[in-house]
Each structure stands twice: as C-alpha cells, then as structure tokens.
Amino acid sequence: MGTALAAKTNCPLCSSPGGRLVEQASGWRVVAIEEHPLPGFHRLICSDHVQEWRHLAPAQRQEIGEALAAWEHRLTEQWQPDKFNLASFGNVVPHLHWHLMPRWRTDPWWPNPIWASPPPACAIEGGWIGDWSSSGPAARVVRQAVFVQEQQVASEDEWDAWDAVARHAVMERDQAPVATGRLLSLGDGRARIGRMSVLQGHRGRGLGSALLAALLDDAQRLEFDAVVLHAQEHAIGFYQRAGFTTLGSSFEECNMRHQLMLKTLEGRHA
Ligand SMILES: [Zn+2]
C-alpha cells in the first residue's frame, strides 16, 4: 500500500489541483472544471494515488460515497438539470476521480456522454438549428446587434453559461445571419424559448414566426411537456397567435416589461 499511496510526480492529479479547488477534505477534494463548456462540471478527486475503487479501505469508500452524493445534490439544486451523470474511468489518468456532470435534454451531447461528438446542425427552412459550436458565431452577430446595441441590454446579461447547453436556431438571408432564438431545458419537463431576435431591416417578413416554429418543432422532438418564454410586451400578440397563453402579471427584466407565457405540447412525433 505504501508505494501505491505515495504521490506520483508524473501524475497530473498528484502534482496539481486538477481544476479550481472548491472543497478540500482529508480524503478527497472537489474542483470546478472551467475549461469545459458544460455548466456545473466538477470532479471529485481521491487524495491518495489509488487506481481502483476496490483498493480503498471501506471507511474511505464510505466517506467518498457520501461526498459524491452530497455534491450531486448540491449541483442539482444549483443547476436544475434533467439528469445527473456521475462517471469514473481513469484510463487516461489512473488516479481515482469522478466526473460530476449536470445534463440537459438541450445540451449538445444529449443523450450520449459529453465525450461523444455532438451531432451536426439540422437544416430548417431558411437556416439551421444546432448547438452553440455550430450556431454561436451566427447567433452572436444577431444578438449583439438586437439586444446589446439596439436594446441596450448589458453584455453580462446577454451572454450566459446557458448558451452552451441550449439549442440555437439561425435564419440567413444572402448567406448572412438575420434571425436567431434558443431553446433551453429547465430540467422539469419544460423548455424555455429565449433570445428571439430578428435584425432591424428584416422584420415583418415572417422570419420570427418561422424561427418560433423551428424551435417548437425541436421542443416536440425532445419530448418537452410545455414551452415557456418571457415575452417583451409588444410581442405578446405574436406569441398568442402561435398558441401561447399569458400567465400572471407582467414584470421587469433587463429594464423592459415582460410577460410569462406558456404553450403546452401535445403528443409525440410519430
Ligand atoms: Zn496521482
């Protein structure tokens, strides 16, 4: 046991924290993995250089098992995912550690592990729908113009961690992006449509309706029970025509009046 437990200088988990340290106990530590786009991604790392779970003493297994459950609970409360993934491999770094991964139905890898290649974007009428890696560059152009410049939304409000786990529809005209919107799982069977935007010179031509239809189709495909959104007051009628109903009274968000709206999805695609 003595040599197995000694720190190995060539082991990345013995010679460095392995992420941003967020909790340190005697037998383990938890680090946040910030270079990965998945929000809430953490690792729990055994303090000793041990390769296999069965090599730990029963008391150590008990302590780490409780810590894993507590962290799963904590990250689930914080991030409200659809599912929690807990994985231990050690094929690349043979020092016992677990990956703690909140997962969403709208994330790029769903339902596969986050190490899988995300599927390519899907064509829709006039554009495509995909994840942030395929849609982000185009969506950024539209959202920057509409929200940050035109509506004066603060950059820190506009760009958030949720883009990485949302589906993004993009519409183009003459090979330039002109409209976008995103669909994000709320982790409770509902998805939220947000960031709906059409460039100023392209409004009033049905792009918003086509975008909304594409996002609703995707929500149906992912078997959500309902879709909610925060409509800017001038857009309430637009969403009502698409089958959304208002819930409660209006509220202030990003210095604008908004209204919570909901559409129930019925049945599943054949
Ligand atoms: Zn090690």
Image: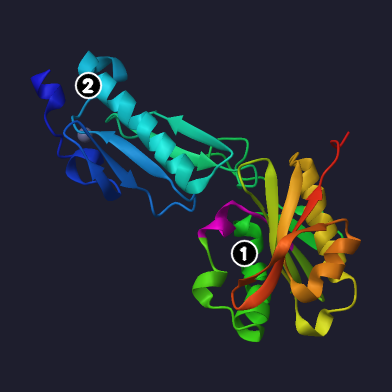
Q: Position of residue 70 (x, y in %)?
A: 36, 33
Most foreground residue, 232 or 37: 232
Q: Give left or right: position of 227 versus 204.
A: left
Residue at screen point 76% across, 41% down: 225
Q: Give left or right: position of 74 versus 245.
A: left
Residue at screen point 30% across, 19% down: 53
Q: Secondary structure at mark 1?
A: helix
**Callout 1 amino acid:** Gly
Residue 116 vertical position relative to residue 154 in the rendered view, above or below:
above
Task: Tell me which numbered mark, 1 or 2, is placed earlier along the sequence.
Answer: 2
Mark number displayed over residue 60: 2
> Residue reaching furthest left?
2
Q: Residues within 10 Å of mark 1 (few under 14, many from 20)?
A: some
Q: Position of residue 99 (x, y in %)?
A: 40, 36
Q: Secondary structure at mark 2?
A: helix
Residue 91 visible in this rendered orientation of the protein: no
Q: Residues within 10 Å of mark 2 (few under 14, many from 20)?
A: some
Q: Quadrant of ligand 1?
A: top left
Mark number displayed over residue 115: none
- The residue labelled by disc 1 is 136
Residue 174 visible in this rendered orientation of the protein: yes
Residue at screen point 82% across, 56% down: 214
Q: Give left or right: position of 217 versus 109.
A: right
Give the residues drawn in magenta, as a range: 161-169
Q: CA distance from mark 1 to mark 2?
A: 44 Å
Q: Position of residue 201 (x, y in %)?
A: 81, 85
